[in-house]
Amino acid sequence: MPWALRDYVNRTLDRNPLYAGNIGPVTVHLWRGAYSIDDVRISKVTANVPVPFFLAKRVDFSIQWDALLHHRVVGRVSMDAPQINFVDAPNDDEKQTGANTPWLQMLTDLFPFKLNSAVIRDGSVHFRLYQAQTPVDVYLSRLSATIDNLGNIRDETKPLVATVQARGLAMDEAKFEFKMTLDPFSYEPTFHMAMRLIGLDVTKINSMALAYGKFDFKRGWFDLVVEADSKEGQISGYVKPLFRNLRVFSLAKDIKEDNVLQFFWQALIGAATAIFKNQPRDQFGTLIPFSGSLSGATSADILATIGNLLRNAFVRAYLPRLENGTESVDGLKFDPPDIASPVSAGDG
């Protein structure tokens, strides 16, 4: 049976023309109605990408026994130490995004029962860019996540019956939390989600800032809050980026740069952040509203963004919390902000 399962899994993974899969031993656990796959590795085959798109120490498919109490036979998938690598590149053929691939259908084909829940332990997600002066690797680590009630086994009447929760660390230090409730039966995406990142040392993402913004950070801390609602594919929400104790320009350091244009660009950014920061809290930030369609264009409200930048600077500083005044998403609670990095006093 393990040999037959291994052959079936390999054939399922090889259906994709863009990605090829390799797996290790397959073990059958008859006593709990499960089987596990060790050393899963899925790599892009149409380009020379240095890292696989997905790898995991173990992927386990099993019957979700507590669902039998609700007279349903459904499955659960759990992953140990999974890693996903998104890769950007100047050439589209060398990018690795995982797009245009039916990953969910492939996962469903690997188990005879409908999947109702998922568990991720010690996962990581990387965004990489190799064709840069300093290679970029921005990542989430120590990621634990759960997805529950995709099949609505409790026959709840509210539309947003499924839940997704995740937490981990950004760049091994900043606290990351993600919460979502969704309607798994909606034809178009219908969900409410919120994400929060607290206390990232901005110097740890200098490689990304140099590659995409042509500047670097001298010091500072970054907080980010995102909240969005989608109803039948129509999405609206906001992004709230906040920089505390930020310093972008240093005359003593930047004047040593050979690139004169970068020197003046750094000086311009440094001056703008100094002018438009909230002085009591020493914070530069804004709130960016957005709306649109998930299948089409999504636009940000530029005038509102500028107004919110001025509000943060001269009226009242934004805080890294949800804008609805609570710290929950349809009953899913966020932990209180545990900011270990320095925070200046402010009115909030």
Image (spheres, rainbow, N blue to C red):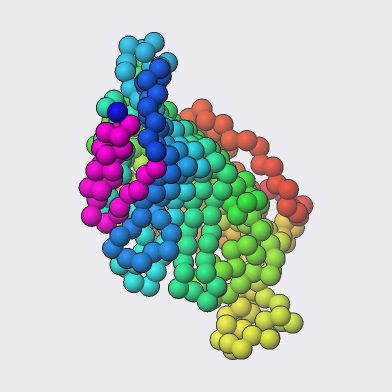
Residue 68 sits above or below residue 16 on the image: above
Image coordinates of residue 340 in percent, x first then y, are: 73, 48
Image coordinates of residue 196 in percent, x first then y, are: 56, 45
Residue 332 sits above or below residue 229 on the image: above
Q: Can the viewer see residue 291 in this picture?
A: no
Image coordinates of residue 347 in percent, x first then y, are: 72, 49
Task: Report the side of 229 relative to 186 (left or right).
Answer: right
Q: Can the viewer see residue 259 in this picture?
A: yes
Residue 18 sits above or below residue 27 on the image: below
Image coordinates of residue 13 in percent, x first then y, are: 28, 45
Residue at image x 66%, y 58%? 201
Task: Report the side of 254 relative to 295 (left or right).
Answer: right
> Where on the picture, by quarter, is residue 30?
top left
Q: Nearer the viewer, residue 269 or 261?
A: 261
Which segment is the magenta one? 2-24
Residue at image x 61%, y 89%? 258
Residue at image x 27%, y 33%? 4
